Image: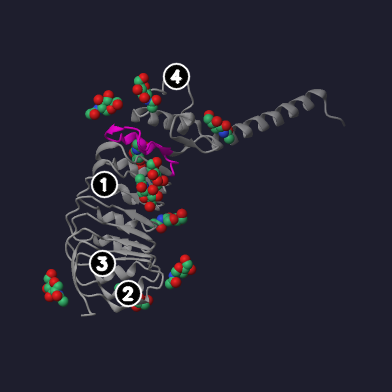
Amino acid sequence: MAFSFYTFIAILLFLLSIIVRSSEITRATNNDSESLVAEEKALMETGWWSNYSNKGVHHCTWPGVRCSPAGSVIEVDLSGHGLNGSITPQIGALSKLKCLNLSSNTLRGELPSSLGNLTQLAVLDVSYNEIHSIPLEIEKMENLVSLNLTRNLIVHMPSTIGLLTNLTHLIMTSNPLQSIIPPHIWNLNKLMTLHLGNCQLYGSIPPNIGKLKSLVNLHLSSNMLVGPIPSSVNNLTNLVSLVLYGNQLNGSIPQEIGRLTNLTTLYLSSNMLLDLSK
Ligand SMILES: *[C@@H]1O[C@H](CO)[C@@H](O)[C@H](O)[C@H]1NC(C)=O
Ligand SMILES: *[C@@H]1O[C@H](CO)[C@@H](O)[C@H](O)[C@H]1NC(C)=O
Ligand SMILES: *[C@@H]1O[C@H](CO)[C@@H](O)[C@H](O)[C@H]1NC(C)=O
Ligand SMILES: *[C@@H]1O[C@H](CO)[C@@H](O)[C@H](O)[C@H]1NC(C)=O
Ligand SMILES: *[C@@H]1O[C@H](CO)[C@@H](O)[C@H](O)[C@H]1NC(C)=O
Ligand SMILES: *[C@@H]1O[C@H](CO)[C@@H](O)[C@H](O)[C@H]1NC(C)=O
Ligand SMILES: *[C@@H]1O[C@H](CO)[C@@H](O)[C@H](O)[C@H]1NC(C)=O
Ligand SMILES: *[C@@H]1O[C@H](CO)[C@@H](O)[C@H](O)[C@H]1NC(C)=O
Ligand SMILES: *[C@@H]1O[C@H](CO)[C@@H](O)[C@H](O)[C@H]1NC(C)=O
Ligand SMILES: *[C@@H]1O[C@H](CO)[C@@H](O)[C@H](O)[C@H]1NC(C)=O
């Protein structure tokens, strides 16, 4: 008729064990301690926090490191911290990283191919360093929105850049590309800012430029570009600044530019354009 005392205790213990186990599972999923340890190890192996790594201070409090509430590293900003040498491949273990700013250091060599593991990365700023190459694996950073490579030593833009279709900002001013305008960028239809000034670019500006309908800022100054300004700039209705000075562009200034009603900055000087007013 009634449960015995011992049955009651047995059921109670059973229920208790379920509660404990499920809370363990929740904790493990919310805060995968194994990957957090791997992240701390990766930070140590960069050598950038050698002053901090052995003093029992939690890595989320190291300078320039920001973590999510769950303890994953989501931002690293060590701009202007005197970093030198190459970027260690272990950086690829920071799988939740959203923003990496290494601007204004003296980092050299290649960007490591393990950067391809940073699929959550939205912002990558390695401007003002001495980086000379970009890995093909950059294509895996599918959430990348902003890429700033200003003033490095990059000689080649991998074709896979064309797969980063979420990019809105591509800033590469002052790199010795010595090529035509990299054709793969015509796929990047969300681009709002494209800076390729002072990159030793030659050849003409192709009509494809009209495909980049979201462009707000187009800077191609101080290159060796020849031929006309294509009339397809007509399609760039959001353009606010068009900076083309210091090339060898010829022909007349396309009338279509007059329809770009948002344009406030137009620099065309130091080219070989015809002056129609004469
Ligand atoms: C690390 O320690 C060295 C020597 O003690 C010091 O010069 C340097 O500024 C420290 N770096 C940081 C990031 O605190
Ligand atoms: C996850 O772990 C970090 C670091 O150990 C800790 O600060 C944080 O409170 C934990 N978060 C959760 C939700 O358990
Ligand atoms: C990176 O840091 C530099 C220096 O603090 C800053 O000017 C720049 O805006 C930062 N980059 C991004 C993408 O926030
Ligand atoms: C890199 O920086 C460290 C620490 O500031 C310094 O000890 C080392 O000599 C530097 N290496 C090079 C190659 O400049
Ligand atoms: C990057 O991912 C690959 C597999 O996708 C893995 O083999 C490699 O160890 C990862 N690298 C880092 C630094 O996490
Ligand atoms: C672009 O971003 C969206 C939303 O974050 C994502 O679903 C998509 O996979 C990303 N990649 C590409 C290449 O569109
Ligand atoms: C690099 O470009 C991004 C996007 O335009 C910008 O936010 C950032 O401030 C730039 N970095 C520097 C050092 O100017
Ligand atoms: C410019 O836009 C028109 C209309 O949307 C389109 O038919 C044409 O192909 C575009 N030109 C280029 C070069 O993208
Ligand atoms: C011009 O700028 C205004 C205000 O920023 C914006 O609403 C509009 O969409 C832009 N484009 C055109 C073609 O007017
Ligand atoms: C512009 O320059 C190219 C060579 O760079 C030449 O073939 C073409 O005839 C020139 N066009 C005009 C209108 O001067």
> Mark 1 = which residue?
151
2 and 1 marks in contact (CB < 8 Å): no
State the residue in front, 267 or 212.
267
Q: Horizontal and vertical percent for residue 162?
A: 30, 58
Q: Horizontal and vertical percent for residue 94?
A: 41, 37
Q: CA distance from mark 3 to mark 2?
A: 12 Å
**Drawn side of residue 127 relative to residue 3, left or right:** left
Q: CA distance from mark 1 to mark 4?
A: 36 Å
Which is nearer the N-term, disc 3 or disc 2? 2
Q: Horizontal and vertical percent for residue 225?
A: 18, 64
Which is nearer the N-term, disc 3 or disc 1? 1
Question: Local crowd at mark 1 within 10 Å, few (<14), some, or many (≥20)?
Answer: many
> Mark 2 = which residue?
257
2 and 4 marks in contact (CB < 8 Å): no
Label 2 CB-ligand 9 distance < 8 A: no
Q: CA distance from mark 3 to mark 1?
A: 23 Å
Q: CA distance from mark 2 to mark 1?
A: 30 Å
Callout 3 secondary element? loop
The answer to whether one can see residue 118 in this image is no
The answer to whether one can see residue 180 in this image is yes
**Amino acid of disc 2:** Ile
> Mark 3 = which residue?
268
Range covered by the magenta-colored residues:
76-98
Q: Main secondary structure of the magenta part?
A: loop
> Mark 4 = which residue?
55
Circle nearer the viewer, 1 or 4:
1
The verdict on residue 90 being magenta is yes
State the residue in front, 205 or 117.
205
Question: Local crowd at mark 2 within 10 Å, few (<14), some, or many (≥20)?
Answer: many
Which is nearer the N-term, disc 2 or disc 1? 1
